[in-house]
Image: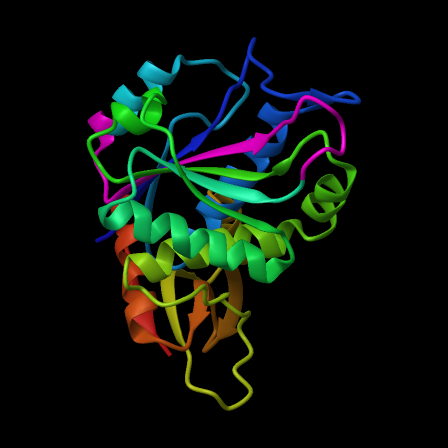
Amino acid sequence: MAKVILDAGHGGSDPGAVYNGRQEKDDVLRLTMAVGRLLEDNGVEVAYTRTEDVYDTPFEKAQIANREGGDFFVSFHRNSSPEANQYSGVETLVYDKSGKKLELAEAVGRELEQVGFRNLGVKERPGLVVLRRTRMPAVLIETGFLNTDADNKRFDEQFDEIAEAIANGILETLGLGRVEEPSGPTTGGERLYRVQAGAFRQREYAEDLLHRLQQQGHPAFILYDDGLYKVQVGAFRQLDNAVRMEQTLRRQGYSTFITT
């Protein structure tokens, strides 16, 4: 199974760029977690260098990634310029322009351009520790300029599209297609694959499992059928995506099977 390490830049005592009270560390943590949820929902194993407001040095972040191991390391940042509203757009940074890291960087740039950002292209930054010290293809994404009002407006108003664009760039580079948003329990006659995590005669037991799954970011729901409250996750058009979701849930300790 594919695995990706996601790094929310800065954190804790290091706010990153600051503009009118807005802090880079907060924007990128929110974006990192949103992209991670999309990847997990589409069958990718995700590990994070941080999931809360804490600080680790770039070298420590690289060490975390190397311990976890993975197909890609993706670091999330927002750019800044000497003067407010001086520049606008996204760029992706790599150690050098070669291999899978360049392929991923270009894919993410193209996807973000489709959202409406100006694509400033791929830049080499061999001096950045998180790009130099990680032992897997690594990309750093600068998602717009924090001190440019137009980029902030786009970041806020199109946040979900931006997260999906980055997830699509990662998924396509991994050869896993594009984001397939799990729908709810209604099929409308269409054949959909779901992952069942439990079935109970008492609804409160089903609700306990439902809440646990949802707290972990899984698109779970309850379906009442044949006298049982069935707790299921996702509704996938492609069997492969359901299989990846089932594998993720099994690694987390759930007893699951795929149903339609």
Outermost top residue: 13
Q: Residue at x 28, y 70 (%)?
A: 240
**Quadrant (top left/top right/bottom left/bottom right) for the C terminus:** bottom left
Counting the numbered discs, the total is: 0
Outermost bottom residue: 189
Magenta residues (range): 66-87
Query: Is residue 249 at all visible to an observer of this figure?
Result: no
Task: Give percent across and percent down for residue 155.
Answer: 68, 44
Q: Is residue 183 above or below residue 3?
A: below
Q: Is residue 52 above or below residue 237?
A: above
Q: Residue at x 56, y 8 (%)?
A: 13
Q: Is residue 233 magenta?
A: no
- In the image, is 43 to the left or to the right of 71? right
- In the image, is 62 to the left or to the right of 157? left
Query: Is residue 131 at all visible to an observer of this figure?
Result: yes
Q: Residue at x 30, y 33 (%)?
A: 95
Q: Is residue 106 above or below residue 139?
A: below
- In the image, is 156 to the left or to the right of 140? right
Task: Give percent across and percent down for residue 98.
Answer: 24, 45
